[in-house]
Structures are given as C-alpha cells and as structure tokens.
C-alpha cells in the first residue's frame, strides 16, 4: 500500500486542466457536482501555448450563458465573414447574410484564462504542475494518484474519471480495444506572431500555386499568420525576411494586396493530422476534446469541438450522478461522435480545398480551382461553408 500525503474524495476527477477540463469542471459546478482537476503542466505553460483564435457562435454562448465571463464581448472581436482568396482575388463569405451568425476572434489562451478565473472565483479544486499521474480501476472504483511539486504522492477517488488530457492523453490508452482512425497530410503549418498592424478587417484564407496561407489577427498591434510548409520544416531555417517574402507571394494578386510587415516575435511548426478514437467511454472513464480526437487547424475547430463534447458530457454526467440514469453514460460516445465526424469532415474539406498537395497533378490543381469557384459563386455552396464555420448548433 502506498502511503499518500492526502486522499481526496470527489464526484468527478478530471485529468487535464486545459479549456476542455476546466469548462467541464465549471459546468459540473453550476449543476452542483464537485470535481478535482489535475494537470502536469503549470498554469504558465498552458497560458503561453499558442492555439487557434476563432470561437463558434455557440462556444461564445456557452461562455456567456454558463457565467464563465463576458470578457469575450469586450476583448474579442465579432467577425461576420471571412475572405477566401484564390487566383489572386478575394471573395467574401458573408456569414451574417448567409446564416445570420458570426464567429468571434478570441484566442484559446484567453478562453483558458477566463475559465481558470471562473473556477478559482467559485472555489474550484485545481492542481497544476503535478507529475506521474496514474489512473487505476476506471471500470469499478476510479482512483487517480499523482506526485506534487514537492515530490509527495497524493490520491483522488471519484465516481467518474474524465480524460481531458489533450493530444498526448494517457487516459485514451485505458480504453480497451478502441478503434483508432487517422489521416496524415503531406504538409504542416508554419505559424508566426508578428508585431504589425492589421492587414485586413477579417481573416483571409488563401490558396495560391505556392501553397496555402492564413492571415489571422490577435490584437490591433499583433497579428497571427500561417503558411503551409513541409511536415519536417525547421523554423530556425527561416529569417524574418524569408518568412515575409513567402507570405507576400502567397497573397499576391492583381488587386495589389500586400501584408503589413513587422518584427516576428514567435514562430513554430504546427502538427497537422486528423485522428478519432472510438468509443469515448470505457466503464467510468470518459474522454473529451483532443484526448479523443484531433483535427487539422484549418477552420479552427479544435477548441470548439472540445467545448461541444464538454456540453454533452456535462449533461450525461448530471443525469448519471443526480438522476441515477444509468443509460446516460451509454449515450455519450454516439452523441459526441456525431459532431466529431462532422467537424472532421469540415476540417479535412477546408484543408484539402485550400492546400497544395506535393503530388497534385494539373488536373488536381484545376479541379481545386473549380471547387472554389463553385463555392463562392453559389449561395448554397457559400451557405454550407458559413454554417460549418460559425458552427452547427449545440444540442
Ligand atoms: C488563429 O487565429 O490562430 C486561427 C484562425 C483560424 C484558423 C486557424 C487558426 O482556421
């Protein structure tokens, strides 16, 4: 028997204190269900990890309606459309006109900061910077143990354990005999933060013969941009001048559009793949967010999908723990996966429609332009994009 420095008993132990784990802990708290949140990373590690910056309409509603924070309304920016740019010309997809919805530019790190502040305000039990997390007996009597920053071993026991522990999840490996679905892409994204003024009021998704580029934003003085690169690209091989030249040639066109340049303050190559694990539950263990699925970043579905999982998960946990509805947990995988596969398709579709595949033939290139032309010249096509981008309603 291990001698634990402490043993805590709670209703739900959540492994992973990123946005998915914190959002679940918050929704459970609102429903009167206690939880403990554990994470190997420190608050600072998570707060300084750059991720995507677009929230779907219902992700914003979740933050507002559940009482997390209304900071998104003050510090975020409503975007009523995006530009699709190809053949050197921009085409606006007007979300408000097409589907009466907007999305919001509000970085994932801000969502994390708001959720953490809300849990702290409400007395949440959040334990960051721990190590050697182990989940035991997840089918009958879940116990999670870990080592704190001073080297002492602790234990948390609970009725349910949730793996919201991201793309390097330890919890997903506890699901017995899962199906795992993968898709690799023959490219990645080079992401930068630059101290520069905005180049355009909304995001620009560009397809060019040199590859994809995305012009996004962070603040009036800091911009976020990405360009398609080789999967094994080394960020240190790229000077500021080389990065700007590459971005400029990808957005160049007959309208004379150019990006406003400035010092590059952060650069990295982002992993790029699609992944789904099913089922998302085994006994008293349930998975949420990147622990169960990964999407490529095109379309910014990762965080939004995690929040949609969490909304379904909070509902099934509430029914299981407060209403003794044993069938509730059984419904989780099917309910969550329906949206997961829609988002998988959307992210894959946006990716393949806009990126240059190294083995593309002339036929493939011209077909891709045919697809984009169809999309922007058809209200039905544009509406399909607007619906997926602003997000299918949560239910
Ligand atoms: C971002 O701003 O980081 C971002 C925006 C849209 C995407 C991906 C990333 O599709």
Image (cartoon, grey):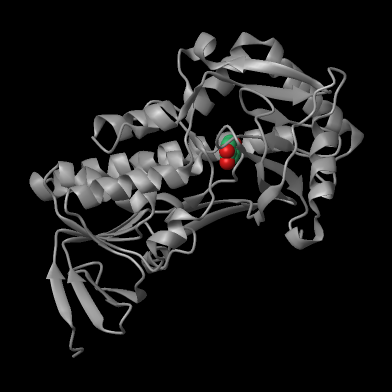
Q: In the displayed structure, does residue 314 sit left or right of residue 87?
A: left
Q: Quadrant of the N terminus?
A: bottom left
Instruction: Give how far across and how far down residue 180 sits, in percent.
Output: 51, 57
Q: In the rendered image of this protein, does residue 287 appear above or below residue 331?
A: below
* Residue 381 x/y as whole percent: 63, 16
**Residue 324, visible in the rendered structure:** no
Tell me if residue 43 can be seen: yes
Q: Is residue 145 above or below residue 305?
A: below
Q: Nearer the viewer, residue 114 or 145?
A: 114
- Tell me which corner region of the image, top left, top right, bottom left or bottom right, holds residue 10: bottom left
Instruction: Write the residue at 29% across / 30% down.
Output: 64
Q: Quadrant of the C terminus?
A: top left
Image point (80%, 42%), residue name? 244
Residue that extends furthest to the left in the rendered view of this protein: 323
Q: Position of residue 133 (x, y in %)?
A: 34, 74
Residue at left offset 83%, top offset 47%? 241
Report the front residue among 387 and 24.
24
Taking the spot 88% from the left edge, 31% from the top edge, the residue there is 363
Q: Is residue 356 left or right of residue 300?
A: right
User: Which percent across, then down, holds residue 109?
Assistant: 45, 47
Question: Is 35 displayed left or right of 245 in the figure?
Answer: left
């Amino acid at each position: 028997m291990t001698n634990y420095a402490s043993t805590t008993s709670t209703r739900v132990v959540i492994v992973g204190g990123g946005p998915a784990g914190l959002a679940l802990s918050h929704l459970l708290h609102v429903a009167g269900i206690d939880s403990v949140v554990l994470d190997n990373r420190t608050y600072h590690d998570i707060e300084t990890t750059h991720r995507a910056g677009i929230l779907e309409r219902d992700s914003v509603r979740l933050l507002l309606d559940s009482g997390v924070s209304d900071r998104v309304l003050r510090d975020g920016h409503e975007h009523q459309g995006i530009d699709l740019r190809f053949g050197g010309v921009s085409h606006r997809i007007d979300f408000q006109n097409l589907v009466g919805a907007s999305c919001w530019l509000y970085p994932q790190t801000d969502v994390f900061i708001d959720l953490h502040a809300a849990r702290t305000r409400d007395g949440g039990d959040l334990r960051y910077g721990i190590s050697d997390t182990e989940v035991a007996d997840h089918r009958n009597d879940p116990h999670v143990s870990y080592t704190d920053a001073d080297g002492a071993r602790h234990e948390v026991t609970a009725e349910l354990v949730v793996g919201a522990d991201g793309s390097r999840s330890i919890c997903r490996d506890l699901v017995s005999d899962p199906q795992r679905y993968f898709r690799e892409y023959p490219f990645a994204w080079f992401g930068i933060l630059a101290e520069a003024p905005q180049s355009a009021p909304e995001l620009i998704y560009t397809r060019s013969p040199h590859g994809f580029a995305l012009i996004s934003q962070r603040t009036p003085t800091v911009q976020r941009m990405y360009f398609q690169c080789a999967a094994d690209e080394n960020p240190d091989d790229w000077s500021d001048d080389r990065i700007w030249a590459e971005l400029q040639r990808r957005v160049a066109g007959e309208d004379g559009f150019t990006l406003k340049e400035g010092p590059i303050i952060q650069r990295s190559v982002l992993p790029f793949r699609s992944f789904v694990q099913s089922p998302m539950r085994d006994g008293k263990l349930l998975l949420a967010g990147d622990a169960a699925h990964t999407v490529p970043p095109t379309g910014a579905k990762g965080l939004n999908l995690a929040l949609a999982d969490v909304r379904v998960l909070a509902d099934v946990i509430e029914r299981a723990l407060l209403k003794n509805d044993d069938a509730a947990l059984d419904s989780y995988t099917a309910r969550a996966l329906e949206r997961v596969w829609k988002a998988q398709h959307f992210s894959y579709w946006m990716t393949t429609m806009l990126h240059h595949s190294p083995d593309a033939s002339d036929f493939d290139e011209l077909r891709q332009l045919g697809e984009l032309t169809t999309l922007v010249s058809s209200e039905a096509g544009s509406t399909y994009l607007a619906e997926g981008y602003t997000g299918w309603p949560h239910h």
